[in-house]
Amino acid sequence: ILNVEQSPQSLHVQEGDSTNFTCSFPSSNFYALHWYRWETAKSPEALFVMTLNGDEKKKGRISATLNTKEGYSYLYIKGSQPEDSATYLCVTRYNFNKFYFGSGTKLNVKP
Amino acid sequence: GAVVSQHPSWVICKSGTSVKIECRSLDFQATTMFWYRQFPKQSLMLMATSNEGSKATYEQGVEKDKFLINHASLTLSTLTVTSAHPEDSSFYICSASASGGETQYFGPGTRLLVL
């Protein structure tokens, strides 16, 4: 079993603050990394999938970067809004077709 | 697009009974479906992967005779927890991906409580 670590476990920010969190993963045999947003009582929503070292993806105020050599990805949220409150999940896939989930970063944005 | 439903959303059953959970892709054909389990304060753990028309591939430590998976069509997979026991109480969530697709689309999950 591979360890995918997300930090911090939880985060409380004020509306309008920008924030970021980290996903660390073993880089050997890496194939792809996914970020999901998971709101309570809803399905996890796919945000990004990244495969190449140096990949950067952006969706509105949310962006992500990937470093496959050192095994980490950052997720950034610019100008957080209360509706951004959710758990952000990092999932990595490896060449042997296995998926590994981080335990998530729970973001709470206070109005 | 890419909506996955799961039913039921929660279920309470007596020890020894069987429980069936359905996972449906509503607007795409899911060639591959995944079943996960999550215990409190832990990450999602993959239980099995199923391709339409084939037997499911179970992860190490997951009993295939206890967790029966059927993926008979491109839009439906079912997970049956046979002879459920209290230790099977958990959150079960499915996901689906289309042919050649990398992204998994998740259902909302099923919370199972076995008394």
Image: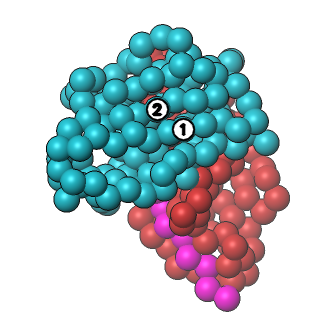
Quarter of the image where the N terminus of chain A is located: top left
Q: Where is residue A69 in the image (x, y as percent from the top left)?
A: 52, 31
Q: Mark 2–mark 1 contact, CB under 8 Å?
A: yes
Q: Which chain is red?
A: A
Colour assignment, chain B: cyan
For marks 2 and 1 on the same chain, the one whose residue lies earlier in the sequence: 1
Q: Main secondary structure of the magenta part?
A: strand
Q: Position of residue B39 (x, y in %)?
A: 30, 53
The residue that disc 2 covers is B78
Q: Is residue A106 above or below residue A37?
A: below
Magenta span has A104?
yes
The residue carrying pointer 2 sits among few (fewer than 14), some (14 to 19) or many (20 or more) residues within 10 Å by Cα, namely many
Q: Where is residue B4 in the image (x, y as percent from the top left)?
A: 63, 42
Give the extent of the magenta segment: A102-111
Question: Which residue is painted at 76% across and 36% down in the image?
Answer: B27
Q: Nearer the viewer, residue B107 or A67?
A: B107
Q: Do labels 2 and 1 share a chain?
A: yes
Magenta span has A1?
no
Q: Specify the amino acid type for callout 1.
A: Cys
Q: Which chain carries label 1?
A: B
Residue projecting furthest to the right: A60
Q: Specify the amino acid type for callout 2.
A: Thr
The residue that disc 1 covers is B23
Colour scheme of the picture:
by chain
Question: Which residue is painted at 70% across and 38% down in the image?
Answer: B26
Q: Is residue A25 visible?
A: no
Q: Can residue B50 be seen in this view?
A: yes
Residue projecting furthest to the bottom: A111
Q: Is residue B62 above or below residue A86?
A: above
Quarter of the image where the C terminus of chain A is located: bottom right
